Amino acid sequence: MGELASGYPPFSDRKPDESLIYDICQGFRPYIPPETPKIYMELVKRCLEHDPAKRPVAREVADIIRDWYKDVWLTCRDSKIYQTFKEADRLRIARNQYKPPEIGNSQNRDWTRVNTF
């Protein structure tokens, strides 16, 4: 899900080795751009939960995304969800966030300090 938010594979700034595996087990999480919409960030946060029992199952993730899609499809561009994601795209383009994250930009995410809409 982080790849959808950033446009790049998770941990693309790291070598895929035992060190990365250890860091992930210790709470290291992929880079998520700060302009990522709050509703999407909350879903990412749940999917990256350390405790697997707290993560949503694939069906729940699919249902959430389907509900977003239906909201946009039924209300077209008047949808708050559509506007939120469109604004995030505008901010990312304005900040040139479509380039790969710099080395070391993945992070040990403190979810209480995430900037959200």
Image (cartoon, helix red, strand yellow):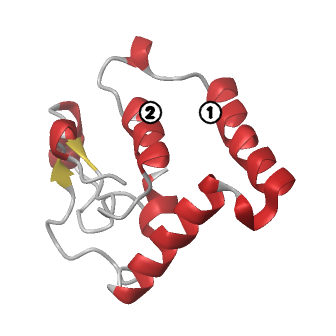
Label 2 crowd bin: few (<14), some (14–19), many (20+), radius 10 Å: some
Q: Earlier in the sequence, mark 2 or mark 1?
A: 2
Q: Give the vertical position of 40 relative to 89 (above or below).
A: above
Residue holding disc 1: 61
In the rendered image of this protein, does residue 26 appear above or below residue 21? above
Look at the numbered disc 1 and give the secondary structure of its residue: helix
Considering every residue shown, the one lying at the far front of the view is 78
The image shows residue 89, relative to residue 35, as above or below, that is below
The amino acid marked with disc number 1 is Val
In the image, is 18 to the left or to the right of 1? left
Name the residue: 22% across, 38% down. Answer: 111
Can I make out residue 91 in this image?
yes
Q: Is residue 90 left or right of residue 101?
A: right
Residue found at x 61% / y 55%: 80
Q: How many marks?
A: 2
Q: Position of residue 88 (x, y in %)?
A: 46, 69
Residue at the farthest top position? 53
Q: Which residue is mark 2?
A: 47
How far from the left and from the top, in percent, is residue 43?
47, 37
For the point 44% across and 33% down, which residue is it?
A: 47
Q: Secondary structure at mark 2?
A: helix
**CB-based contact (under 8 Å), mark 2 and mark 1:** yes
Q: Which mark is residue 13?
A: none
Say which quarter of the image contains residue 95: bottom left
Name the residue: 32% across, 17% down: 51
Q: Nearer the viewer, residue 7 or 65?
A: 65
